[in-house]
Amino acid sequence: MNGVLWTFLGTLLTFSMTSLGAAGVFFVRKEIENALQCGFLGFAGGVMVAASVWSLLLPGIEFAEENGQTSWLVITGGFLLGVLLLLLADYILGTWEHMSLEKGTAMLVTAITAHNIPEGMAIGLAFALAAQNPGDAALFSGAAALTVGIAIQNFPEGTAVALPLAQSGMGRKKAFLYGSMSAMVEPVFGVLAAALAGAVRPAMPWFLSFAAGAMIYVVVQELIPEARACEDEKAGTLGFVVGFLVMMILDVALG
């Protein structure tokens, strides 16, 4: 089997599911209640926190241990690098005399995109391993299951990017584009990982924890404060709980 080809097809599926989730902006009224808007922001935060734990940090620890690395040290280092990148981006964007929406947009899309890079690489590594061992059907089945799991998880992630942007005043088409394009890195980095499987595997814990650090920073810095800013602050909290549970269930059930 051709690991690169299967990786491309698999990540094309995950990208399509992200786009499908982002398409939710076309089915929501442009003007909605403030409480519901805060609920969407909370939902996005919950999805990102759960994904950081179950999709990034825990697999990163497993990868590090398999590679004989000191897992806590590698994960901590990668996480802090992700936070530092967003701190730097926050500082640079803060010097621009633009609307705060543009800053929030850039940070949200950057974090979700950073999260999608290691997901694409994980699919690439799984199919590359299956291609290297064609007699082991379980490896291919595992790679396919991983792809389906990530694809299903990407649906709420596309929604988590596009809806808050649309409800903050961005046009629906542009919000959909941002939501969809956040997953474009999956096919790119997935194919690269499949082609260079031996070289990139040791670095996977760094990529995974880096993405987790970036996402947690955005949740704490941007999403939670905005979700708590509405008149009914419990709407953001309940949205967070729902988003967290949805993503946790998907990650655990499909992991």
Image: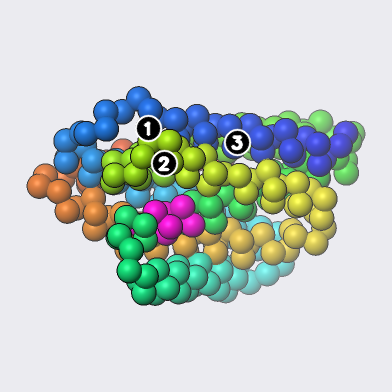
Name the amino acid, label 3. Thr
Disc 1 designates what residue? 25
Question: Which residue is outermost to the front?
Answer: 97
Disc 2 designates what residue? 175
Question: Would you identify the image quadrant in which residue 159 lies?
Answer: top left
- Horizontal side of 126 relative to 29 (left or right) equals right
What stretch of residues is rendered in magenta? Answer: 104-110
- Horizontal side of 69 relative to 238 (left or right) equals right
Q: Are marks 1 and 3 in contact (CB under 8 Å)?
A: no
Q: Position of residue 232 (x, y in %)?
A: 11, 44
Q: Is residue 106 magenta?
A: yes
What's the residue at 23%, 50% (across, down)?
227
Q: CA–CA distance between discs 1 and 2?
A: 7 Å
Q: CA–CA distance between discs 3 and 2?
A: 19 Å
* Residue 86 can be seen in this image: yes
> Which of the pair 148/191 is nearer the observer?
191
Disc 3 designates what residue? 14
